[in-house]
Structures are given as structure tokens and as C-alpha cells.
Amino acid sequence: MTRLHDLYTDQGQSPWLDNLRRDYLHNGHLADLISQGVRGITSNPTIFAKAIAGEDDYDAQFASLLEERDDASPGSIEEIYWDLVLTDIREALEMLEGTHATSNGVDGYVSVEVAPALARDTTATTAAARDLHQRVAKPNLLVKIPATVEGVPAIRTMIGEGRSVNVTLIFSIERYAAVIDAYLGGLEDSVAAGATDLSGVRSVASFFVSRVDTEVDRRLNLIAASGGTRAALPTAQLLGTAGVAQARRAYALFKDRFAGPRWEALAARGAKVQRPLWASTSTKNPAYPDLLYVDSLIGPDTINTMPDETLAAFMDHGNVSRTVDVDPDADRASLERLAEAGIDIEDVASTLEAEGVASFAKSFDDLMDVLAGKARSFQGSGADTKSGAASSREPQS
């Protein structure tokens, strides 16, 4: 057994992979990771941009889809993008069907995100999430909806319709509380509409961790360099403390909100908790331990989605012991000291949310430009790519 298996069986935390590439699906790499204990997959526009722009595995299918449409307009290029992405998503879902079945729906999920340009549009986000669920039509699909102010109502609507959701880009306790309420409210809406069994609706709440430290550390260093009165505080001792402390406080909120009469009424109808998912868990600052955001956040009913390097590091030397709630008072004190030093954690969250939305949107737009360039190249070459494209669309063993 591997550390990944131990993480789940001993501590109740599910290790997921924060990456999806077509070569992983076809060269045995993903199958190997699943056998070693990976229990789910997350993706986002940046991940797909890197995969599609950086690999030639997609070229044959892209050329075939382009030839079928005979249209290289921006709208057509975006439609082709979704065909490429959903091909990977469907294959990954098939590979994780066994995990989904044997875990009784706890794991075995693959996440795909709505277009990032929709993050500030509730109606469009709702329609896009519904469309992705209908196009894929698999019980182990999670559609990712950002936890923007506009995204929260879409989350409630999707849950109310019985559609499973991965809520992404959560950076603060306050917004996380709103996300939990949207999940509970959606389940209650489903009951009000006549649902008697809520067990098929699943959700995870993706709380971003390392990016919080990156932004807080930047602000602490500015405070220290300013020479003001707050600079006298020991800011150096606060570096690298915000991300883990806030995530642990989020776990405390999770435990509190998924208890009591409101939750018990839903649980009696088969409802499942909305598990916290620790995202952005690679260490951005090389001065920090490589598994800072993994080893420090282990506990029951949680998920840690790790990029390849972090996953490999955990398999090599990760700690398998409960840490997420080892000292709640210390976590609370850490956040209080940050506030005393001049860190407005809600303003940090607002900054990171805006940056996250913008980053995903830029990755998406950049990829559209890359695909438009490929389209011009293929159309200019006049090459017949249909035979190669057809084989690329078939699942490979």
C-alpha cells in the first residue's frame, strides 16, 4: 500500500490529482496513479491551456473538427475547444468509474470548469453549468463554478436541480460560509420541489491555500519595509502562516455547519456533506517545506488536490497523521496576529479572487489565440487529417 492509500484509509482524506492531460490518459500514467491511490481529478482553464497548447496529441482531433465545421470563427474555435476538453473529461470519468462505484459515490470524480469569462454573470454561469452536465451526463462529473458573488446563486440553483458541483476560487472564511449556505439552500430547494432522496447530489468546496500566503507575505514585507509603527511587529514570524491557519479555520466552520437541526433534516433524506477541498497546495515559496499545504491539512471528510510534483513528493515522504484541527486556538491566534500587523484578510481574498478569475480568463483567451493560429496553419496546409483524427478520438487501452 502507498501513502496515498493510507491517507484515505487511515485519515479519511482523499488525494486527487490537479492535472489532466491527454497523454496521461493514453500512456498508462493516470491508470498508474489511480492504482497508487489517486481518487479524483481536478482541472481548470490554465491546466487545459497548457495541455492543448503544449502537446500534439490534440492536433488530429482539432484538425478533424475544424474540417467538419469548415469554420475558423472565434465562436467555432471555442466550440472545438469544448469538444477537445470533454473528450478528455469523458475518458477520465470512465477510468474513475470503479473508484466512484466502490466508494459509493464518495470519490471517483472529475471536475471541469465553466468558461472563466462567465464568472461575473449568474445567469450565464447557471446555463453553462447545466449544459456541461447535460452534455457529459455522468454521475461522477463535477462542474466547477467560481465562488464569486455572482457564482454563489448559480451554485444553489445547480444543487437544487440535483447537479453536482465543485465550488472553486474560495479565498476567505466569509465567502466559504456563503458557499456552504448555497449548498444547504440548494438541497432544501430540492426537497421543496419534491425530492425524497438527496444521496445522488455531491459537492466539494475548493479552498485555495498557497496563494493566500503569497499575497499575505507580499503585504507583510511591504509593511516591514515601510518603517511605520506596525513595522515594529515581528512580521517575519508571520510569513507563511496565513494559508494554513485560514484553511484550518475553514475546516472548523465545516464541522460546525454540517451539524445541528438544519443539517440533520437534510441528512435524514440522504444528503452528504460538502467536503472541503484544499486547492493550490504546491509550495510557491522555495523557503517553505514542499508539503506545507498537504501535511498541515490532513483530516476526515477532506480532499487535497495536488499537482504532479506535490503528489510525487507526498508519495515519497508525506506525513500521514491528522493535523487539520490539532490546535484551533493557535490557528485563531495566528489570524489575529496578522490582523494586528495590518493584514486585512478579506481584502486579500478580494484581490486573489480578482486575480484568479483574470488568470483563468487570460489562459482561456491565450489558448483561443493558439487554436486560431493552428486553424490557419491547418487550413493553409490543406492536409487530409481525417484518418488520424478519427483514431485519436477513440479511447486507447
Image (cartoon, grey):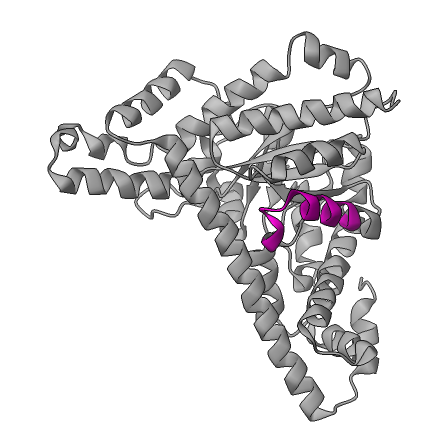
Q: Quadrant of residue 346?
A: top left
Residue 226 vs residue 332: left or right? left
Return the residue found at the far top. Answer: 261
For residue 32, say whether it is visible. yes
Image coords of residue 153 (percent x, y): 66, 34
Image coords of residue 38 (percent x, y): 65, 42
For residue 111, say whether it is visible. no
Q: Quadrant of residue 196?
A: top right
Image coords of residue 304 (percent x, y): 56, 37
- Specify the segment rendered in magenta: 117-132
Residue 303 vs residue 340: left or right? right
Query: Residue, x 47% and y 40% (percent of image)?
Result: 317
Task: Tell me if residue 209 comes above or below residue 17 in the rendering.
Answer: above
Q: Specify the quadrant that holds the N terminus.
A: top right
| Front-lying residue, 246 or 228 | 228
| Front-lying residue, 82 or 309 | 82
Query: Residue, x 59% and y 55% (percent of image)?
Result: 117
Task: Tell me if residue 296 comes above or below residue 389 in the rendering.
Answer: above
Q: Specify the quadrant that holds the C terminus.
A: bottom right
Query: Residue, x 81% and y 25% (percent of image)?
Result: 190
